[in-house]
Image: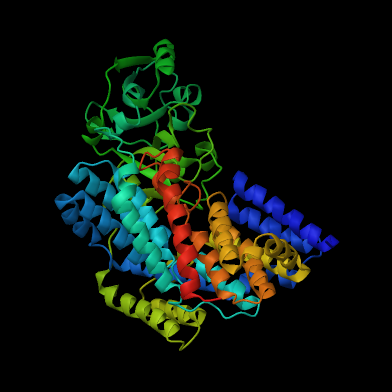
Amino acid sequence: MTIEIGIVLAIISLAVVLFVSDRFRIDTVAVLIMTLFMVTGILTPAEGLAGFSNTATITVGTMFIISTGIFKSGALNNVGNILTRVGRKSYLMCLLAVMLLSGSLSAFINDTAVVALLMPIIIQVCRDIRISPSKLLMPLSFGALLGGVCTLIGTSTNMLVSGIAQAQGEEPLRMFELTPAGICFLVAGIAYMFLIGRHLLPDRIQAQDLTESFGMGDYLTEIILLPDSPSVGMPLKNAGLVQNLDIDVLQITRHKKYKFTPTTYTILRANDVLKVRCDVEKLKKLKEEKGIELKSERKFKDNDLRSNNTKLYEAIITPNSYMQGKSLKELDFRSHNHGATVLAIRHRDEILHDKLTHGKLSAGDVLLIAADKDQADALRKNEDLLIFSETERSAFDYSKIIPVLLISVGVVVSAATGLVPIVVSALVGVILMVVFRCIRLDELYKAIDWKVIFMLAGVLSMGAALDKTGAASYISYYLINYVGLYGPHVLLSAFFLMTFLMTNFMSNNATAALLAPIAIVTAQQMGVSVRPFLMAVTFAASLSFMTPMGYQTNTMIYGPGNYKFSDYLKVGTLLNLLLWLLASLILPYFFPF
C-alpha cells in the first residue's frame, strides 16, 4: 500500500465516521473531505472541484426546478380527493393506492417533494377514516424509495452513479435502464407491505386534539397584567415575565374584547389579559411576581385556541433545513415568523416543553406552533418547515398545468430516446419553464436544494481520489481474493448487502460515491461486465428501510407518524433482506455478467 492510498483510506474513514455520527451536516462533511483531498495533494484544485461541473450535479439541480414547476402548477392537486375516496372504502386499498401513487410519482419527481406533498393529505385521510397515521406514513415513504429506483431521474443517487460511471469511461445510465429491475423491487415491496408489513406497523392511538397530543394541558394559562406591573409600558421582548421566566405569550386580550397575537415589539398595557405557555414551576413563580394576577388555572384545549384567530399547527423541520443544529433563540424564531410561537417540540420519542429556546433542532423534529392566519401563511412559505396538521394549500396557477406537463414529458422523452443527453434536455426544460412563466427566476434559485448540490460535488471527490491513487484497485483486490473466489454472483450479492447496510447509517449518496468506483474496478479485474455491479450499488443505495436516518423521507415521517426507532427495524429489516435476495436473483438476469 502506497502513502497516497493510505492517505485516501484515512480521509474516507474520517468521512464515514462523520457521516454516521451525524455531528455535522452531510454537505459540510462532503466539502470538508473534498478540501482535505486538495490540501494533501491527492487531488489538484481542478480535480477536487470537478464535481460542481459534473453532469450528475447539474442534472440534479435542474430536476429540482422542474419538480417545483410541476407542484406549483397544481397538476397533482387532486390526489387527496382520490385517496380519501379510496380510504373510506378500505384501508388495504388505501395502503395499496398510497404506495402505487408515491412510487409512480417519485419515479419522475424528487421523492422528498413527493412525500412533502402527500404527507398532509394522508394524515387528513387517516383522520377521516379514523386510523392512526402510523399505518400509512411508512408505506408512503417506502413507496417513494421503491419508485425512485425505477428511472434515472428517480433519485439523485441514480444520477450520481451515472456520472461516476461516465467519469471512469463507462456508459452512463440510460433513462429507463433501471426500470425492469426497479419495477420488480417496487412490486415486491408493495406485496410485502400488503401481506406482511402492515401487520408489523404500529397502531398508536392519536390524541383528540393537539394540546393533548403534545401534553400541553398544564402549560397554557391566563394572567392579568395589573397597573403596578413593571412590564406595563414595555415591549414584550423586554418585559420581565419574558426575560426572567422565559414565558411565551400566545395572545393578548385588551379592553375585554380585542384579541390579537402579539409580536416581540407589542407594548404591554395595564389590565391586558395574557394567554401564556407556563409549566407548574413557572406558575408558582408567576404567583409571586409583582403586578400579576392569575385569571384562572384551568386547562386549555385545542379548541380554546381555535375559538379565535390563533390556531395550533404541527410543522416538521425538513431534511437539509438550515434550522438543523440551531436553537429557536439563535434563529430568533418568533421575530422571523411574524410572531408565531413554538409551544412544544417532539424530538424522536420525547416531547419537550421546557427550555425550548435553547435546545438544538434536528431534521424530523415536530414543532407545535400557535399562529394566526397571516403567521400560518408565512410559515407555509418557509421552505425549512412543512406544516402537515392541515391540508390547506397555497394558490396554484392551473393555467400552467398543460405547458408544465408538456415540458416535463419532453424532458423525459428526449433523454429516453437518446435525442440529447439528460443534462441537456433538463436544461432546455428549465429554460422553457422560465420562458412560459411556469416558474419565476427568483423561485428558480429557491427551488434548488443547494445543500444537495454541494454534497454531490463533495462526495464525487471520493470517487476521483479512489480512482487516481489506485485505492479502489487495492480494496477490490481483497474483495476478489476473499469473496470473488465463490464467483461473480456471490460477489455481486455481497456488494448489494454491503451497500444497503451502509446506506442505513450514512448518506445514500456518500455510500454510492464510495462504493461505485470500487464496484467498477472489481468487475474490470474479474473480467466481467461492470453493469451488474454498478446496478447493485445503485439500487441498494436507495433501498434504505431499516433506520429513520437512512433516507430523508424516513426522517420526515418519523415525528408525524409517532414512530420509534424499533419500528423501522421491525418493518424495514425483513423488507431489506427480501430485496437483497431478490436482487441476487434478478440483477444477473437483467444485467448479465
Q: Is residue 49 above or below residue 95?
A: below
Viewer-closest of 376 and 85:
85
Identity of the residue drawn at 29% across and 16% down: 297
Position of 185 compared to 3: left or right?
Answer: left
Q: Quadrant of residue 481?
A: bottom right
Q: Quadrant of residue 493?
A: bottom right
Q: Quadrant of residue 396?
A: bottom left
Residue 448 visible in the picture: no
Viewer-closest of 188 and 472:
188
Q: Is residue 491 above or below residue 319?
A: below
Position of 369 compared to 323: left or right?
Answer: left
Q: Indicate the quadrant containing the N terminus: top left, top right, bottom left or bottom right.
A: bottom right
Identity of the residue drawn at 38% across and 53% down: 141
Residue that lies at the very extreme toward the left in this rendered image: 89
Viewer-closest of 44 and 73:
44
Residue that lies at the very extreme toward the bottom in this rendered image: 419
Residue 496: x percent and y percent? 54, 60
Identity of the residue drawn at 53% across and 56% down: 500
Q: Is residue 258 above or below residue 144?
A: above
Q: Is residue 162 above or below residue 187?
A: below
Viewer-closest of 491 and 157:
491
Residue 504: x percent and y percent? 53, 51
Position of 489 compared to 234: left or right?
Answer: right
Residue 201: x percent and y percent? 34, 43
Q: How is the image coloured?
A: rainbow
Residue that lies at the very extreme toward the top in this rendered image: 288
Residue 146: x percent and y percent? 40, 61
Residue 585 visible in the picture: yes
Q: Indicate the quadrant containing the C terminus: top left, top right, bottom left or bottom right.
A: bottom right
Residue that lies at the very extreme toward the front in this rendered image: 486
